[in-house]
Image (cartoon, rainbow, N blue to C red):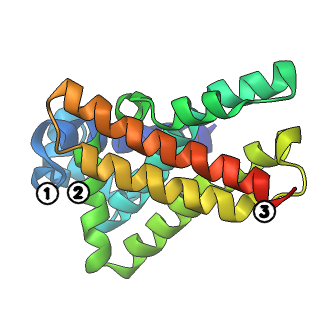
Amino acid sequence: MKEKISTARKQEIIEGFYRLSVIHGLENTSIAKIGKYLDMPPSLIMHYFPTKDILISNLIDFILEKYLLIYQPIIKELEVSKNADSTLIVETLFSRNWNLLFDDGVFYSCFALIFRNEKIKKEYRILHKKLRESLKEILDSNPDMEGRDTAVLAEQIFVVVEGAYYYLSMFDDEADYNLKVGYFKNQVYDLLRKTAVQQL
């Protein structure tokens, strides 16, 4: 029972930290502010998370948990039809659901810390590795991908997706955004087709 309360309290703190970071920015969100926001003594927060860096590491785990939800439409399709076509994969990966799952500003603020914090750098490597491994598992479950190097394909797809989202975040014009996202989608479709051709 005590362990369940502890787990729930930690989750409450992480989610409070996230919500405040969305509003005020990661760099402006202190343990004292989290305590005030959650009506919780800062000493209690520090009992679970002695430093802000430890709290950020746990926030990165929270990011991964949210981002893995992006695969749900593909997984459901595989469960029903045993096959997820390339259109569903590409449209899901390039949907704006990423933005709904986790705030881009908080994600990139955390990411910037990898250049001066080795632990956070390692956490981000784990996050990206898990996203790729999960995509590989989806590709492996698709009969059309049988015998193909899905590990390499997952890497190539994510390089395009991640680069696209970084670049597209600078565009506000809807028509311009859609035009450019079309280029990146086609690049992933080409990767899927080339992989198929190479295995013939």
**Which percent across, then down, holds residue 133?**
68, 56
Q: Secondary structure at mark 3?
A: loop
> Amino acid type of disc 2?
Ser
Q: CA distance from mark 3 to mark 1?
A: 41 Å
Residue matched to label 1: 27
**Residue at left offset 35%, top offset 58%:** 55
User: Residue 149 — which label?
Assistant: 3
Sooner in the amino-acid sequence: mark 3 or mark 2: 2
Q: Which residue is mark 2?
A: 109
Cβ atoms under marks 1 and 2 closer than 8 Å: yes
Residue 114: percent from left, percent from top: 32, 73
- Residue 114 left/right relative to 61: left
Estimate the spatial distance between the alpha carbons at disc 3 and disc 2, rounded to whole Å.
Answer: 33 Å
Q: Secondary structure at mark 2?
A: helix
Q: Amino acid at mark 3?
A: Asp
Q: Residues within 10 Å of mark 3 (few under 14, many from 20)?
A: some
Q: Earlier in the sequence, mark 1 or mark 2?
A: 1
Looking at the rendered structure, the kind of residue marked 1 is Glu
